[in-house]
Image (cartoon, rainbow, N blue to C red):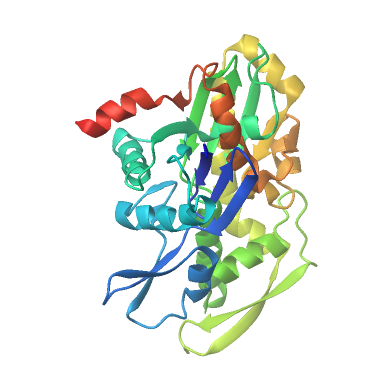
Amino acid sequence: MFMDIGIDLGTANIIMTTNKKGVVINEPSVIAYNKRTERVVAVGTEAYRMEGRAPEHIAVVHPLQDGVVSDDILTQALMRELISVVAAHPVVKPRIVVCIPSLITEVERRAILDAATGTGFRKVHLIREPLAALLGAGIPINRPVRHMVVDIGGGTTDVAVVSMNGIVTARSIKIAGNHLDQSIIRYVQNKYQLLLGKKSAEELKIALCNLYDPSDDVLHTVKGRHVTRGLPDQCDLSEIELFEAIEDDIAAITEMIRRVLEETPPELVGDIYQNGILLTGGGACLGGLEQYFRRTLGVRCRIAKDPLTCVARGTAKAFRHRDMLLDGFERIESYEAMHEV
């Protein structure tokens, strides 16, 4: 049976879609393997639950960092295990389209390609994340109307202006969800001498983030280990403190959006001010982000429906638009040639 698979190969999560069922896999981009036997023990959610709890001979690894492949062998293994669930017994090996950040090096691009082709796919395409995000949001990108999308993932934030099936201007920065978590960990450690884990920092970010109107009165108790005593401890953190922890990161993302607007031809900016900015990715769910961007940039913003899976849903539509997309969708022929070199 013929099958197309779209893959949002994210730093935090790997989301897979098919042309038949839509989103079928949404799992953390984590793999656990036995260092003694060199065999995969668990992937996805099961491996994520083992993080910080596994015995010494079990390594729990995030094979993707900052939106790119840091370990191609483990990335192949992760993809292979999850794809075996999606396409258990396909008659013909599926075609896939994999999302990539707007601006990555040729080495990083090749690493993603090698990871994908190493799993035995029949054909591999690459699509830039902003383009996939707009497709997933149901925006008709083939019209002569300009749209701006800000995709805040786990490893990278991508900003692009799209018009007439192609990307006009784009920028990418390696400041996103995971970087915000690290900033929270550093802030709490420096101010309260309390060491947090990555999971605790992420939970704190989700529960307490208010970028638009943070308050000293809204508190959240966070637990960790005291740096000097080495014993369990806790502290109460306010919305204002959390804002201080991630303020520089949010400011860097805002500055990148401003630069893209400055680089966009003047005749295109009017459409963006009229249509607003589309926010996608897990970072779009940060409390008050929509209002923060509106206040600092003076441009209306809106969050895509189900922003976490928006990019992945766009990959599922990419094959239907492959003959129209002018920029941002890489055709297979060139990659087959590259792979044979």
| Residue drawn at the location 50% of the way across and 66% of the way down | 186
**63 left or right of 286?**
left
Front position in the image: 210 or 304: 304
Q: Is residue 167 above or below residue 236?
A: above
Is residue 239 placed above or below 248 in the rendered structure? below
Residue 8 drawn at (x, y percent): 52, 44
Q: Nearer the viewer, residue 171 or 128?
A: 128
Q: Is residue 30 left or right of residue 289?
A: left
Tell which of 318 and 157 is nearer to you: 318
x, y (%) of residue 24?
61, 51
Residue found at x 54% / y 66%: 45
Query: Which residue is outermost to the right?
Result: 217
Picture coordinates of residue 95, whole percent (x, y): 46, 36
Image: 204 above or below 243? below
| Residue drawn where x is 63% and y is 47% of the image | 23
Q: Quadrant of residue 238?
A: bottom right
The number of discs equals: 0
Taking depth in this image into account, of 3 and 265 the one nearest to the observer is 3
- Visible residue check, residue 106: yes
Q: Quadrant of the rendered structure where residue 27 is?
A: bottom right
Q: Position of residue 84 (x, y in %)?
A: 46, 55
Work out whether residue 103 can be spotted: no
Which residue is most to the left? 341
The image shows residue 238, relative to residue 55, as above or below, that is: above
Q: If the image is split into quadrants, where does the C terminus sit?
A: top left
